[in-house]
Image: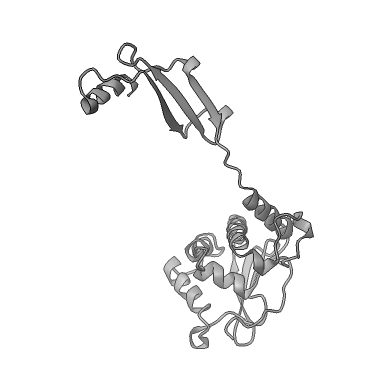
């Protein structure tokens, strides 16, 4: 506390030591709406031996912390532009789905988040555990046909708000696996995919020829709202 500042000085520097002019910087995460986002408050303590610490507003200065991230803002705008308004289907390529499930050197795995939504918000309920679905997802993306594999030559994932479900296309012949979802499940998966894509595009902009200096719509279309052939990710 401010009132103890000179006692600490005496303990360190000896009797009679006094701090006559000090600035204490306080990080305050819980502040009024006016300073939402955090502030740095600097309180000057003068002649603390005589006058204990002060909260005199004349001696307190506050300024908002600049938490803006222009690059992330540009990535977010790009992803939102091409994902659309939430009513269209979302397709993920093999590269994207494998990155979402397995993670990459620069992005985390979203396998547990993905599996929890499917198990907890399916309709009708799916008789699997989150852990068993996570294992299956890892096997489907390990390039080993002996334990199952996503279709390698076309976008293997399709989320359809209109059909309220997630569809997977599997090797060897493009057979379909459907996961019917509640409305809340569709919304949760849309949000998760959006979060993943912001993360992934931000870390690997070259995969999308993404240029943050351009307007979102003038960047190349990543075709998330239409199915596309894929290069074989296991070649």
In the picture, the quarter occupied by the N terminus is top left
The spot of residue 113 in percent (x, y) is 50, 61
Which quarter of the picture shows residue 87? bottom right
* Residue furthest out toward the top: 50
Above or below: residue 68 compared with residue 63: below
Q: Across the whole image, how many numbered discs are drawn on residues? A: 0
Q: Which residue lies at the image location 53% right of the left edge and 77% below the top edge?
A: 141
Residue 85 left/right relative to 44: right
When the figure is inspected, residue 189 is found, relative to residue 68, above or below; the finding is below
Residue nearest the viewer, comparing 229 with 176: 229
Q: In this view, does 202 lie to the left or right of 1?
A: right
Q: Residue drawn at (55%, 63%), measured in percent from left and top? A: 122
Residue 221 image position (x, y, % from top left):
75, 65
Q: Nearer the viewer, residue 112 or 98?
A: 98
Residue at image coords 58%, 69%: 179
Q: x%, y% of residue 196?
A: 58, 60
Which residue occupies the foreground of this view, 191 or 75? 75
């Amino acid at each position: 506390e401010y009132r103890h500042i000179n006692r600490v000085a005496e303990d360190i520097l000896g009797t009679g030591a006094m701090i006559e002019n000090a600035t204490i910087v306080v990080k305050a995460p819980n502040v009024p709406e006016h300073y939402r986002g955090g502030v740095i408050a600097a309180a000057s303590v003068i002649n603390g031996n005589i006058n204990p610490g002060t909260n005199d507003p004349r001696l307190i200065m506050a300024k908002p912390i600049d938490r803006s991230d222009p690059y992330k803002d540009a990535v977010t705008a790009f992803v939102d532009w091409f994902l659309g308004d939430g009513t269209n289907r979302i397709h993920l390529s093999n590269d994207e789905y494998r990155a979402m499930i397995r993670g990459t050197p620069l992005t985390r795995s979203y396998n547990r988040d993905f599996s929890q939504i499917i198990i907890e918000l399916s309709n009708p309920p799916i008789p699997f555990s989150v852990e068993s679905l996570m294992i299956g997802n890892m096997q489907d993306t390990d390039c080993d046909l002996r334990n199952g594999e996503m279709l390698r030559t076309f976008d293997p994932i399709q989320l359809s708000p209109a059909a309220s479900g997630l569809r997977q296309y599997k090797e060897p012949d493009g057979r379909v696996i459907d996961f019917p979802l509640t409305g809340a499940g569709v919304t949760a998966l849309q949000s998760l995919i959006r979060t993943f894509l912001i993360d992934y595009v931000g870390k690997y902009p070259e995969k999308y020829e993404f240029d943050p200096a351009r307007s979102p719509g003038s960047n190349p279309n990543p075709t998330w709202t239409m199915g596309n052939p894929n290069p074989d990710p296991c070649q």
